[in-house]
Amino acid sequence: MCFSATANFVGSAVLGAIGVVTLTEVKHRRELLFAAMPCLFAFHQFVEGFVWLGLGGTLSPTVTHDAGAAYVLYAQGLLPFLLPLSVLLLEPTRKQRRQMLPFAILGAALSLYILWGLIAYPLQVSVQDNSIVYVNAISTTTLIAILYVIATCGSLFFSGYTDLVTLAWLNLVGLLVVMVVKRYAFTSVWCAYAAVVSVIIYFFFRRSRPQRPSTYATA
């Protein structure tokens, strides 16, 4: 999250609380991964708090780099696969799940490629204009950014749930704004925005409870 370690830690605590409440709305184990997204974003923001502390001189360069690597590992290496997979598992019909499959496959391939890039090439972490900048020769290219958008937002657009389509639009608009205004700090700023927007997931589970099946195998 932008600005400071305090902003990250406070945001993490709020998102964590919302995430725990969201998990209480789960009706079936297939919903767990998507319901866990606010908690995962909360932990993600918590980790970046340590990056801020390290860049401020409170922690050693080694700890700072490791925290930055852990942050990027989730943001770039795992999220492109976990998000479309969670939506695929959530959808109640085979037809809708088939529509999600290409995004999950793209996300899996993208995650493997980015994970290789994070291992093979060094990660640079710095501060610019009150935002943390993460630079890797593989994961921060324009092509990867486009594929990232398709994988993370695409499945939501094809969801059978209106709230998830709304979430897709909010993520896409936020992503495009960040690309224009703060492209150099895209990973940090967009993940902070996505973390805030993930609060919609709680309202989705509350509002869709009557429509979500209790047994997905018979859906």
Image (tube, helix red, strand yellow):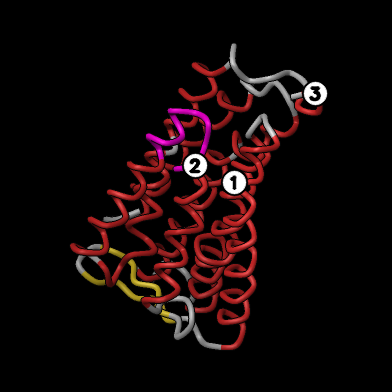
**Circle number at residue 73:** none
**Mark 1 secondary-structure assignment:** helix
Q: Position of residue 156 (x, y in %)?
A: 48, 42
**Mark 2 secondary-structure assignment:** loop
**Mark 3 secondary-structure assignment:** helix
* 191 over 206 or under it: above or below: below
Mark 3 crowdedness (10 Å alpha carbons): few <14, some 14-19, many ≥20 = few
Residue range (magenta): 157-167
What residue is at 26 percent from the left and 59 percent from the top? 178
* 100 over 126 or under it: above or below: above
**Circle number at residue 99:** 1
**Mark 2 to mark 1: distance in Å?**
7 Å
Name which residue type carries label 1: Gln
Q: Where is residue 191 in the image (x, y as percent from the top left)?
A: 40, 54
**Mark 3 to mark 1: distance in Å?**
19 Å
Of the image marks 2 and 3, the number of the one nearer the N terminus: 2
Q: In which quarter of the image is the C terminus?
A: top right
Q: Name the residue under label 3.
A: 218
Q: Are marks 2 and 1 in contact (CB under 8 Å)?
A: yes
Q: Do the residues labelled 2 and 3 touch (CB within 8 Å)?
A: no
Name which residue type carries label 3: Thr
Of the image marks 2 and 1, the number of the one nearer the N terminus: 1
Q: In which quarter of the image is residue 32?
A: top right
Name which residue type carries label 2: Phe
